[in-house]
Amino acid sequence: MKKTLSIMLILAVVLFSIVMTGCEKKEEAQTQKVVTMAGPFTDNDAVKFEESIKAFEAATGIDIQYEGSKEFEASISVRVEGGDPPDIVDFPQPGLLENFVKSGKVIDLSKVLDMNKVKQNYIQSWIDMGTMTGPNGPIVAGIWARVNVKGIVWYNKKAFDQAGYQVPSNWDELKGLMAEIKKDGDTPWAVGIESGAATGWTATDWTEQLMLRTTSLENYDRWVKGELKFDSPEVRTAIQTWADLWFPEGNVYGGRKAVATTFFGDAPKVMFENPPKAWLHNQGNFIVSFFPEGLQAGVDYDFFNLPAVNDTYGAPLLVGGDIYAMFNDRPEVRQVMEFFTSAKSLETWLKSGGALAPHKDVDPAWLTNPVDRRLQQLLIDAKGLRFDGSDLMPGAVGAGTFWKEMTGFVSGSRTLDEAVKSIDASWPE
């Protein structure tokens, strides 16, 4: 009898323990805070993003549930317009975010974040690019996260140093370097704008970079909004400035005609032949993935920022990147957004490579090689910067006639006059 009672008592204790454990887990599940997020990160980028938020989730108990999609642009429009937006949305192109801002669906971050702290950690240009106009006026629509730098001039460091060439600090010195390379019997530039259906986008990047060096940031903003026409002295000057580098005989490997048929990823490879067939290549920091295998950053290749054309406008950076917007306001969502305003949110991503940070509190030591660290320092020291212009323009222009007409201009099938007038005519009413 006593043995039976003992067994029953043990079973009761075990059952009670199971019930209490279940209750605790249920209570934990009920109290755990979830923040939903959607964006374009998939595959390796998604893994890197998940790694970057683990420490925050462990410290706060907030579960950031990220849903990445390669059809992000289409899927997010359905969710937002259907009244079921994620708490936070990661936009790789600010133009899409601006559409939702205009319809009043995005929360003004200046009302939910400490903007003094935000402004301390971003240069003003990032704040400017995140400010958009809603139904009731301008709002801070998003904060910037992972970014990349465009408009970087890459070169074969070993050959460059052996030849005794010097990195130019202004436009005149750049033209002097080109003259020196040609005098030595070589070709200054490696350029290619072929990219399948997207052929021409590298020429639009050059146009954007020269807009930032030949006119004001305000005019750049007017241009991407359609307020400053392509057929204006400012835009014509920007295009003609890069054309003056490319078109003269002997300035580009393969000549002007080859530019439109050379795949952009193959273009820089001729710099690393022995001897180099060209010496300079202008492209974003992602281009190093197209370099021949086995090259060491800072040893085999290096870069400089495309120099200022004149001192009036300097050499602002052209950038791409991700801007995070908030669609639902709860304390935990605010806490996540505040986390994203610090470089700590990108620390593990920076250490693994493939990203740069827009934040001032970034530790350059997190970057994996000396070239990435210098690129990061460029962002930290930047006095001005702007987002890729073609990505901000209406799709019919930025990913349509702008690409097409610049390709025609480069190949010689279109005059500059014909190209700019055609682009302006394509701008939606």
Image (spheres, rainbow, N blue to C red):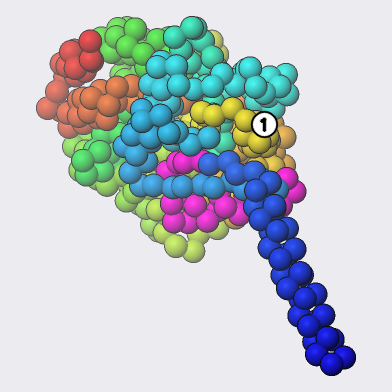
Can you say whether 427 is above or below 248 in the image?
above
Q: Which residue is mark 1?
A: 331
Q: Nearer the viewer, residue 86 or 166?
A: 86
Residue 28, can we see it?
Answer: yes
Quadrant for the C terminus in the image: top left
Q: Position of residue 197 (x, y in %)?
A: 21, 40
Residue ranking furthest to the right = 2
Q: Position of residue 350 (x, y in %)?
A: 62, 48
Quadrant for the N terminus in the image: bottom right
Can you say whether 94 is above or below 67 in the image?
above
The residue segment tinted magenta is 37-60
Residue ranking furthest to the front = 1
Q: Is residue 38 magenta?
A: yes
The image quadrant of residue 284 is top left
Q: Nearer the viewer, residue 424 or 38?
A: 38
The image quadrant of residue 427 is top left
How crowded pointer 1 is (Cα within 10 Å; few <14, some 14-19, many 20+) is rated as few
Residue 350, can we see it?
Answer: no
- Helix, strand or loop for disc 1: helix
For the stretch drawn in magenta, the main secondary structure is helix
Which residue is pictured at 70% across the width and 52% down the height? Answer: 27
Q: Position of residue 276 (x, y in %)?
A: 39, 52
Which residue is pictured at 82% across the width and 80% down the height? Answer: 9
Q: Nearer the viewer, residue 327 or 325?
A: 327
Q: Position of residue 297 (x, y in %)?
A: 56, 53
User: In this figure, what is the number of numbered marks?
Assistant: 1
Can you say whether 314 is above or below 26 in the image?
above
Tag 1: amino acid: Pro
Left or right: residue 370 compared with residue 130: right
Which residue is pictured at 45% across the width and 33% down the height? Answer: 85
Which residue is pictured at 60% across the width and 44% down the height? Answer: 34
Q: Is residue 215 magenta?
A: no
